[in-house]
Amino acid sequence: MLVKNNYSSIILVVAIILFPLQKIAILLMGSRYDLTAFILLFLSLYSFIFFKKTTIAKIIFLAFFSIQILITLFFQISPYYRFVSGIVWLGGLLLLILGSRNIEYNQKTIAKTIIGVLLITSIYICFEGFILQIDRPQAWFYEPSFAGLCLYGGSSGVLISLIMGKQNKKIRFILILCFILLITAAILTFSMHFITFVVSLIVFFLFLLPTLISIDFKKVLLFLSFGLLIFIIGANLFLSSHFQSRTDIADPSNLSLLAWLQGYDQMIAAIGKSPFFGLGLGSTGNFNFKSEYSDILQSVGKSDLTLNDAFSLAFRLIIEIGLLFFILLLIFLKKKLRKFKVLFSYYKKNGMNIPTPIIFNFVFSITVILGCFLKEPLYPQSFLYLSIFLVSSIPLYRKEYKTTN
């Protein structure tokens, strides 16, 4: 490997420590660029350029880059600075997908660091919520929604690790305490990413159902117990005025919901204009489309609210790079899920236990990516870069894991 285990693990630990510190991000031309995104971008760029076995990956990246230039020149919608930003930061995410497997790092170290950072964040959020009486605490994240997504991602990772992995009583007890603290802090943010949390659990449960059937009774009971707890929490959350105002699609009045629905209409309009390749990087918010929700937002002086990012990463990707590349991304994620299932089945078949760090890192990352698809559209988000890096680089073959454990 080009980037050795010791060096890359240290760099990644630094990136993870910084990922909740979004308030010290770099601000440029009205946009925010997280420090973690810079670190991971340069790490993968270095590996991508200098690692010898990336010829096919370089061809793929060059093809993507060329298509984006042609699309942008054809439609002439994107301002040049937004196109450049899109090439750098969405291109950076593509670099992570194509080149991060060339980077060695210790899975256990990374899992411990993520959990540790999230626990510190949770403690501070509980302090903000219970002591300072802040309505929606967010710790050092830029928004409560961002904090909620990462905490729910950590909660998913810990819970699935408890169900799928095997730990001694001490570690299991610690993980249960971690889950309680993470889910408590996540709830305090009043983030709509509770939906992401539930969807993530459903995805993993359904995808792994044939394998999970053989899990012992105690784990099934544990899962059902936490499932009941999550159901009770969810019922109470969705009965609150905060959640009801953000889910009332029939009669929307909440600004966030109106902006999300406007983003959906913008995506539909973009599909009508260019379904396969989109309208070009940076085109979001820069072409005309009809939406009744835009009219409502304009009437209250919020016509530009999230107009340039469509409020959802899924919406924005379809607008800017089209259905073809978005579907390819979904296929990539599905392939990773399938490999994760195969790895788990292999370990069980041979009477072994899949390492808990692999489970946590993978589930955390998938949950965060799902949440970004739902309602976090910015490319240079620290948690998006971290999650794409992990999903792309986690060794999902036993022979790969042996070299990076």
Image (cartoon, grey):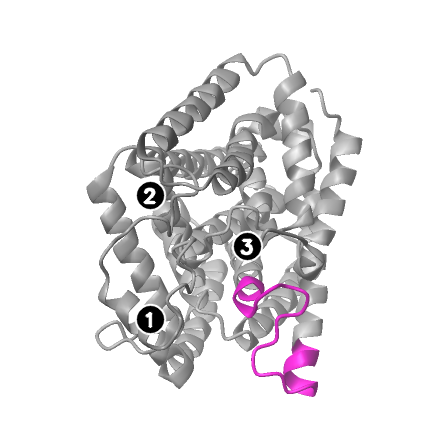
Please report whichever mark, 2 or 1, sits nearer to the chain's N-terminal start: 1
Tell me residue 225's x, y (percent).
Answer: 46, 70
Q: Residue at x 55, y 35 (%)?
A: 88
Pair 2/1: label in front: 1
Vertical placement of residue 28 versus 140, above or below: above
**Residue 109 appears in the picture as rendered:** no
Pair 2/3: label in front: 2
Q: Which residue is mark 2?
A: 318
**Toward the viewer: 354 or 3?**
3
Q: Residue at x 48, y 53 (%)?
A: 367
Secondary structure beneath dot 2 equals helix
Along the horizontal axis of the image, is 211 left or right of 177? left
Secondary structure beneath dot 3 equals helix
**Residue 40 appears in the picture as rendered:** yes
Q: Which residue is mark 3?
A: 157
- In space, the residues marked 1 and 3 are separated at their CA atoms by 41 Å
146 within the magenta span: yes
Quarter occupied by residue 148: bottom right
Secondary structure beneath dot 1 equals helix
The kind of residue on which mark 1 rests is: Gln
Please report contact status of discs 2 and 3: CB closer than 8 Å, yes or no: no
396 within the magenta span: no
Q: Residue at x 55, y 54 (%)?
A: 157
Please report contact status of discs 2 and 1: CB closer than 8 Å, yes or no: no
Tell me residue 54's x, y (percent).
Answer: 56, 16
The kind of residue on which mark 3 rests is: Gly
Along the horizontal axis of the image, is 384 left or right of 50? left
Magenta residue span: 126-148
Vertical placement of residue 114 versus 241, above or below: above
